[in-house]
């Protein structure tokens, strides 16, 4: 039923749909040649750690060479350089540069909020059961410090916007001091209705923190129409910026009370300028980020790149899902209530990745035994394969997984039963 490696599209195409034509560089080479990814592996998990194109790696090397050639010149000039980079990054996100501060990752952005927000209401914090683990753990620490507790909204995986909204707002009451909601969930690859939640939270006077870790690059304008006090997102995921490149966007009266996690000489500066001085740190990642964003824009255009990623992720889910269904006799497709572009879930055989620890163990095992980098996730005691497509991926990557890896997953599942 499946494709042999390197084979042309066969009649199976009628069952799983047409594979999108692979993207290429301006000189005709495959898109993957613009990255330094190991060709011995299939890279099917862009969503976890991203992948940095060579042009951005080279730009960061150039900046590091400047830094190391004259550090006493470099570091006093660094705030000016970072302020200019903030303007470029804000334009990409559709944000006001005066609202945008630079942070190492989305979890750090959430930590800034947790460290600076004073106790409100009865000290309760509302999160969802789809929340990113590190961000939720930070909320739990804050609730303990406030003498409150965390209330968890249970949102079914197949919940549409209305049901998800009602589930979150049902946990918000007079004692709520903060609401924390993902724009795109990590483990379950779905959206949550943050726009509608934001409007109601603002009406009730409850601060809202939106975890937009996956949004930059995957959503065209992640802040458009969004009412929130705090938003944090990673540019080193879908934006392909160097590691440790993220932003915190803060709006409204609580913005000026935010300070970096590191006290440095910019502490007396206004927000967000005070975030441009964090001691003697290598900030070349943020300075090189525009090179990655511009590369994708010049080569394919972000709208075309997003369209390709979404079509390819959908094709991959159908191909892999069909292989799993043939293996197990059960439907492997997943009904996600608010799907997102570029990411898909496929249900794994029973017994695989049924907890976070088990899912991480599969992730670590897959490169050596399957020849792939893949994301295995767990939600509600059910294991899933989370497919994340980027411009360097091709239909053949997913056909390979269906042909070569799915049978091995079946063996692994039988071994744990």
Image (spheres, helix red, strand yellow):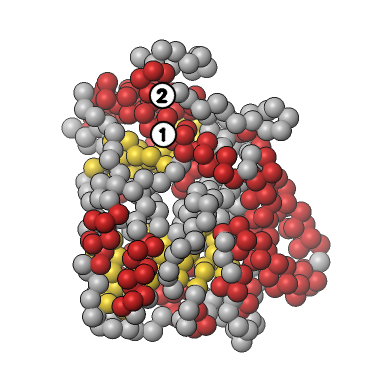
Q: Nearer the viewer, residue 225 or 365?
A: 225
The residue positioned farthest toward the bottom in the image shown: 268
**Horizontal relation, residue 121 to residue 264: left or right:** left
- Check the image and report above or below for 287 versus 364: below
Front residue (pair 343, 282): 343
CA neighbours of label 2 inside 10 A, class few (<14), some (14 to 19), many (20+): some
Residue 85 figure quarter: bottom right
The residue identified by callout 2 is 17
Q: Which residue is drawn at 73% across and 58% down?
A: 64
Residue at image coords 48%, 54%: 215
User: Which residue appears at 23% of the width and 61% of the height?
Assistant: 167
Question: Circle 1 — which element?
Answer: helix
Q: Do the residues labelled 1 and 2 touch (CB within 8 Å)?
A: yes
How far across and down, in percent of the image, does residue 104 sit?
A: 54, 63
Residue neighbourhood size for the residue with mark 1, other residues' Cα within 10 Å, grouped as few (<14), some (14–19), many (≥20): many
- Residue 244: % across, % down: 56, 58
Residue 278 makes an appearance in the image: no
Residue 269 relative to residue 189: left or right = right
**Mark identifier at residue 314:** 1
Give me the residue at 70% from left, 73% from top: 79
Q: Quadrant of the N terminus?
A: top left
């Amino acid at each position: 039923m499946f494709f042999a490696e390197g084979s042309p599209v066969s009649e199976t195409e009628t069952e799983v749909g047409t594979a999108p034509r692979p993207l290429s560089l301006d000189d005709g080479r495959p898109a993957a040649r613009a990255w330094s990814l190991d060709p011995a592996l299939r890279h099917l998990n862009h969503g976890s750690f991203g992948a940095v194109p060579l042009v951005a790696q080279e730009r960061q090397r150039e900046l590091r060479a400047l830094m190391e050639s004259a550090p006493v010149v470099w570091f006093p000039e660094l705030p000016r350089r970072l302020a200019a980079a903030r303007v470029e990054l804000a334009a990409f996100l559709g944000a006001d540069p005066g609202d945008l501060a630079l942070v190492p990752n989305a979890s750090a952005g959430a930590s800034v909020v947790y460290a600076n927000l004073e106790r409100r209401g009865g000290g309760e914090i509302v999160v969802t059961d789809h929340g990113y683990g590190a961000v939720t753990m930070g909320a739990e620490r804050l609730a303990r410090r406030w003498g409150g507790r965390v209330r968890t909204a249970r949102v079914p995986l197949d919940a549409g916007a209305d049901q998800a909204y009602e589930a979150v707002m049902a946990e918000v009451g007079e004692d709520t001091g903060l609401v924390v909601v993902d724009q795109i969930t990590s483990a379950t690859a779905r959206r949550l209705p943050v726009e509608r939640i934001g409007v109601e939270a603002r009406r009730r006077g409850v601060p809202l923190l939106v975890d937009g870790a996956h949004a930059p690059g995957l959503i065209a304008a992640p802040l458009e129409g969004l009412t929130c006090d705090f938003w944090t997102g990673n540019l080193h995921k879908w934006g392909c910026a160097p590691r440790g490149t993220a932003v915190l966007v803060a709006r409204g009266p609580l913005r000026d009370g935010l300070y970096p996690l590191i006290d440095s000489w910019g502490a007396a500066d206004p927000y967000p300028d005070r975030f441009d001085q964090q001691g003697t740190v290598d900030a070349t990642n943020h300075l090189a980020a525009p090179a990655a964003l511009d590369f994708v824009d010049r080569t394919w255009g972000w709208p075309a790149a997003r369209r390709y990623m979404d079509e390819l992720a959908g094709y991959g889910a159908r191909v892999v899902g069909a292989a799993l269904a043939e293996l197990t006799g059960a439907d492997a497709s997943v009904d996600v209530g608010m799907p997102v572009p570029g990411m898909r879930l496929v249900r794994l055989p029973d017994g695989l990745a049924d907890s976070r620890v088990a899912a991480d163990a599969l992730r670590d095992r897959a490169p050596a035994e399957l020849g792939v980098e893949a994301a295995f996730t767990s939600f509600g005691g059910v294991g899933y394969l989370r497919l994340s497509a980027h411009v360097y991926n091709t239909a053949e990557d997913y056909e390979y997984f269906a042909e070569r890896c799915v049978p091995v997953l079946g063996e692994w599942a039988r071994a744990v039963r």
